[in-house]
């Protein structure tokens, strides 16, 4: 029995949520996301933008996107939410 009750994400071509075409500029990071979930039609979301930099932030955004897609949040709302996300406060930030 092949019970698979989890999804994978990342840049590995076998990932269910495959990160592609990463581009960064001075204001944001942009990437495409190819979603291949068993028993569902493949979806490609183009030009997802986050106002953060670094691979870890891209992966965090994709993890949040995976949860959002799974529970039925629209692609429009996901993209808008990610674009408006300003990050989290850190313990070493100066006040």
Image (cartoon, helix red, strand yellow):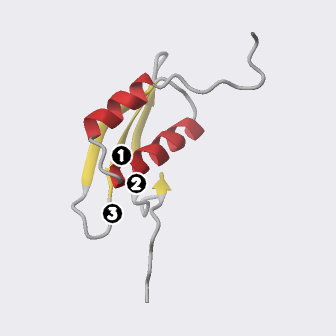
Say which residue label 2 marks.
Answer: 17
Q: Is residue 87 visible?
A: yes
Say which residue label 3 marks.
Answer: 37
Does 87 appear above or below 35?
A: above
Which quadrant of the rendered structure holds the N terminus? bottom left
In three-dimensional space, the C-alpha distance between marks 1 and 3, rounded to whole angstroms, equals 12 Å
In three-dimensional space, the C-alpha distance between marks 2 and 1, rounded to whole angstroms, equals 6 Å
Q: Quadrant of residue 84?
A: top left
Mark 1: secondary structure: strand
Q: Are marks 2 and 1 in contact (CB under 8 Å)?
A: yes
Q: Position of residue 66 (x, y in %)?
A: 41, 50
Dot 2 or dot 1, earlier in sequence: 2
Q: Residues within 10 Å of mark 3 (few under 14, many from 20)?
A: some
Q: Are marks 1 and 3 in contact (CB under 8 Å)?
A: no
- Count up the numbered dots: 3
Mark 1 or 3: in front is 3
Dot 3 or dot 2, earlier in sequence: 2
Q: Nearer the viewer, residue 90 or 53?
A: 90
Say which residue label 1 marks.
Answer: 33
Q: Nearer the viewer, residue 89 or 51?
A: 89
């Amino acid at each position: 029995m092949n019970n698979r009750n989890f999804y994978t994400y990342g840049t590995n071509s076998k990932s269910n949520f495959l990160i592609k075409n990463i581009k960064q500029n001075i204001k944001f990071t942009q990437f495409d996301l190819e979603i291949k979930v068993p028993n569902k039609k493949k979806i490609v979301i183009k030009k997802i933008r986050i106002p953060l930099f670094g691979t870890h932030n891209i992966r965090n955004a994709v993890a949040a996107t995976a949860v959002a897609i799974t529970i039925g949040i629209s692609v429009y709302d996901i993209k808008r939410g990610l674009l408006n996300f300003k990050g989290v406060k850190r313990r070493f930030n100066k006040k």
